[in-house]
Image (spheres, grey):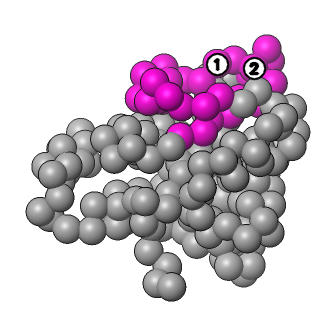
Amino acid sequence: MTPLCRREDSLLLCIDIQERLANAMVEPARSRMIDNTARLLRTAAMLDIPVLYTEQYPAGLGPTVDKVRSALPADARYFDKTSFSCCGADDFREAVRASHRRQVIVTGMETHVCVLQTALELHDDGLEVYVADDAVCSQKMAHWKSALNRLRQVGVYHAPTESVLFEWLRDAQHEAFKKVSALLRD
């Protein structure tokens, strides 16, 4: 099958985009990651794509950042975790299976820790994993690059947010095209 993101097969996963952790990220990577995650979330809501999101030890790292939290669809499913991989959170894998989606689009931080471990485990579970490479970040650019290279080596795809959005739409005639295009200009 062609490695395109397919709306009907996609699940969006936002990993640990929390206040205290986000404050440790460098600009412009932090703002780009938050903005692109919000774009993905808003589009997922328009297209009825299920959303899962996590927080790593929220008592210490704080809640999900406002811009991301306000973009979450009402039916987004939340997972509190202490494991670095989302797969270690209670009921996470069951939620992925219950979605009946074969593709997981991943955003969040940090790329070389929680994103990497989650993507590797989901890939190992037989899912098509796509990391939105401009919607993930690490404190150090070298760690971000290393993680993306490692993921590519094992067959985890990565693509920019705009590619994911237009693959979901597939055609400029899609009823959501103008709204999604407007999100990209914001």
What residue span does the magenta drawing correspond to?
A: 51-78
Q: Is residue 54 covered in magenta?
A: yes
Q: Is residue 168 left or right of residue 152?
A: left
Q: Is residue 151 left or right of residue 103?
A: right
Residue 63: numbered disc: 1
Location of residue 56 in the rendering, given as x and y in whole percent from the top left corner:
77, 30
Label 2 secondary element = helix
As shown in the figure, which amino acid type bears the numbered disc 1?
A: Pro
Location of residue 143 in the rendering, given as x and y in whole percent from the top left corner:
72, 58
Rendered residue at 69%/43% (across/down): 95
Q: Which residue is mark 2?
A: 58
| Mark 1 closeness class: few <14, some 14–19, many ≥20 residues within 10 Å | some
Rendered residue at 65%/41% (across/down): 15
Contact (CB < 8 A) between labels 2 and 1? yes
Location of residue 128 in the rendering, given as x and y in whole percent from the top left corner:
62, 69
Toward the viewer: 78 or 100? 100
Q: Is residue 24 visible?
A: no
